[in-house]
Amino acid sequence: MGEKPPPRFQALSYGQVAEQRAVSEPVIEPTIYLGDGTQLLKFAPPRDDVGRMKPGPKRGKKQKRKTRRKTTRKKRTKKKRKKRRKKRRRKKRRNSVRTKTQSRTLLNEDLRTATTAIMQQSGTLGAVGDVLHRRLDDFGWNAVLQSKCDAYVAEKDKESEEYDVDDIMDAVRSDPDIAMPEEVKREVMRNIRDAILRMCLDLGIPAEDSD
């Protein structure tokens, strides 16, 4: 068999290409002439033997930044915010559990004995507010209830001797200051309603109840 013909294009390495180019294309060194033709300056970028550009002189080491980088501060605040949120959530969960447990034990017992406590006091409508205030002390929302009861009682005292349980229940239920889980609030309301009705019955005060 005959010999293979030489390849049409021969693969060259980078060095070889540069070498060929250096031969075929002489480096034209830029020069600057003044108006009258005198040569002012002759300069050319540094090149190696083959004609490749030489790297220029290395600059000095970069200075360290004086101020803190924004990204780290951003990250730090993000982390702290996340931590705070987690803490708040845990606290809420703990409190809600405590409230639920109290509502099933403390409140039920306390409001059942509220009637007896009232009978030992004077037979006035104001006593209803007083007892509720004491019984709900553990929940931290007694002050709201107390003011609602007091305002209601004072108003009713002026007008008549009738006590509308529904009115006060609605006022308390819609109050934004009473922060409680909804199911607990419902249970508490039911207990309060029963207690108020029993108190009123024992004191001989007429009380309206729509249920």
Image (tube, grey):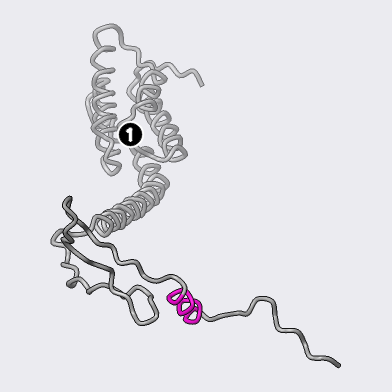
Q: Please tell me how many numbered marks the rendered image carries.
A: 1
Would residue 210 be found to the left or right of residue 28 on screen? right
Q: Amino acid at mark 1?
A: Ile
Relative to the observer, which residue lies in front, 89 or 174? 89
Instruction: Give the residue at mark 1.
Output: 178
Would residue 13 be found to the left or right of residue 23 on screen? right
Residue visible at 24% across and 55% down?
Answer: 70
Relative to the observer, which residue lies in front, 73 or 84? 73
Describe the element under mark 1 as helix, strand or loop.
Answer: loop
Q: Residue furthest front?
A: 36
Which image quadrant for residue 182?
top left
Would residue 205 be found to the left or right of residue 194 on screen? left
Which image quadrant for residue 123?
top left
Residue visible at 29% across and 26% down?
Answer: 128
Magenta span: predominant SS is: helix
User: In the picture shown, does residue 208 fall above or below 76?
Assistant: above
Relative to the observer, which residue lies in front, 151 or 3? 3
Would residue 170 be found to the left or right of residue 211 on screen? left
**Boundaries of the magenta span:** 14-23
Q: Residue furthest right?
A: 1
Relative image position of residue 99 (x, y in whole percent): 37, 47
